[in-house]
Amino acid sequence: MITQDSIEALKARLDIVDVVGSYVELKRAGSSFKAPCPFHDEKSPSFTVNPSRQKYHCFGCGAGGDSINFVMEYEKLSYPEAIEKLAASTNFTLHYTDNAQQKKRSTLLETLNEWYQKLLEQNKTALDYLHERGIYASSIERFGIGYAPTSPETLRFLDQRRLPTAEAIEQGAIGRGEEGRLFARFIERITFPIHSTSGAIVGFGGRTITGHQAKYVNSSQSAIFNKSRLLYAYHLARDSVYRRREIIVTEGYLDVVMLHQAGFTHAVATLGTALTSEHLPLLRKGEPKVFVAYDGDKAGRAAAFKAAKLLSSSGFDGGVILFEGGLDPADMIKTGQIEQLNALLHRPIPFIEFVISETIDGYDLQDPKAKESALHESLGYLKTLSPLLQEEYRPLTASKLGISPSLIRLGNTQNAQHKPLQLSHHDIWELSFIKTLIERPHITDSILDFIDGSLLQYHGSEFEAALRGEINDPRLSALMMDDRIRIFDGDEGLKQELITFLTAHYNRELKKLTTQNTVSFDQKSYLIRQFREKIERLKKGELVPLT
């Protein structure tokens, strides 16, 4: 068992706003924070987080407790599992009453990073590349930049240090290929350690300097690494973000390093993925203005457009900065264009203005039908905004289209009516599972041994439609278009998701069974044994058949 002193020490380290804010978007309301409750569907927020009491409470469904309770309920974990998850994410070592159970906090990634840093000092090619990009030695040290060698060298290092193979696989340092062969995930790459908000290393990004096909790679998805929720260097930028009430989001690690080097210490980057709704809780912290600073090429503009739509529809203030002519922040800093960069960063295009302009510029306005399509798409976007903002941006939309503002008919439609439906975490899990099956139909047969539509509480009919291959079903079409719904990563990721879901399901069934009076004693005893056996097997990491 985990000692009570250890639990209390962990609680003292936790900030409930940080913990809850990692899962849901919190908005300040006086001295507290509010959000729509993640545990039941609601239109107006009744879920409150009180930082002074370190408690949360929902006035709608009655859910409440501390940080540990929240993680238990949201992640469907037991009390010890929630404590261990929080300890891992905050670099905290737990103590147990039984020394045999004592688990030291894993230092595998830190050990690997220290080795990578030493290897960088010895690698002239890698150092020359970084110096040519304008990166100072002080920045290399501050960001912990290193160098990963060949796969055999990394495997040999792990073996010499007696670092557990299972742990290295679990934390994304190595992988297992065909015929069980082990390989390092980072080979001949400059490495950038990626940290959680608390500063613990949770993974790496790697840039090739020897011509590997993929320029950048990241650690694989794991219990501690979710690239759609993390922002590179946020742990270093956080104080500046809170102080300045601004955050710059870029596309690359080197851009962040160079921006910090030039004094823009509120810069972060996404991890090789577009900005998604899963990033919003982290971006919301400190309520900063968000500035999306992307390349001005076609891909950069498309990414900025998508980010601007997401951020403006979610109520964020800020704007878009595009770097034209093939330049990026790192290039401008290297060539000494700090003043020009500073001026550019202080002249962002407001999100709404950028989305309207990009939307309309995508159509040939000389073609009446194309012009009508541009109007409809613009109206659809405007209706995701508040009524006040809709009215404010009507003249701009009309001007861009070259039409009378009277043709911009928004009616009395409420903003919420046009926004995507609020989804609980239960909905999102089930829809993610269904989306995964649609994207990867080859796994369906093996999955049906463990789960069927009757186990889904909310979306069983969509599950059955997906099994029948009815991809034109409007519900499935909407599901595939919804960026909030992610696809479970890899076979191992899907397995872990199923284990978590099935454990919660069988625990619910066991609880219901113990209160039933319509089942005979013998039958009830038999079923209780069956459920308990399944739960135990699931806890050991084994999927159990339905029958």
Image (cartoon, rainbow, N blue to C red):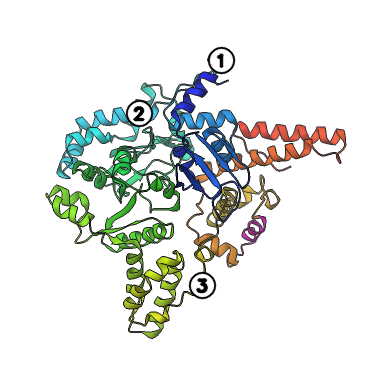
Type of the residue with mark 1 = Asp
Residue 266 at x, y percent in the picture? 28, 44
Bounds of the magenta segment: 460-470
Quadrant in which the N terminus appears: top right
The residue where tag 1 is placed is 98
Residue 390 at x, y percent in the picture? 42, 69
Residue 335 vs residue 269: left or right?
left
The reply to whether discs 3 and 2 touch (Cβ–Cβ < 8 Å) is: no
Q: Looking at the picture, does residue 85 appear above or below residue 416?
A: above
Type of the residue with mark 3 = Asn
- For the image, the number of numbered tags is 3
Number of the label disc, if any, that sits on residue 523: none
- Of 46 and 267, which appears nearest the observer? 46
Q: Earlier in the sequence, mark 3 or mark 1?
A: 1
In magenta stretch: residue 468:
yes
> Label 2 to label 1, Cα distance in Å?
27 Å
Q: Looking at the picture, does residue 6 appear above or below residue 120?
A: above
Q: Nearer the viewer, mark 3 or mark 1?
A: 3
The residue where tag 3 is placed is 412
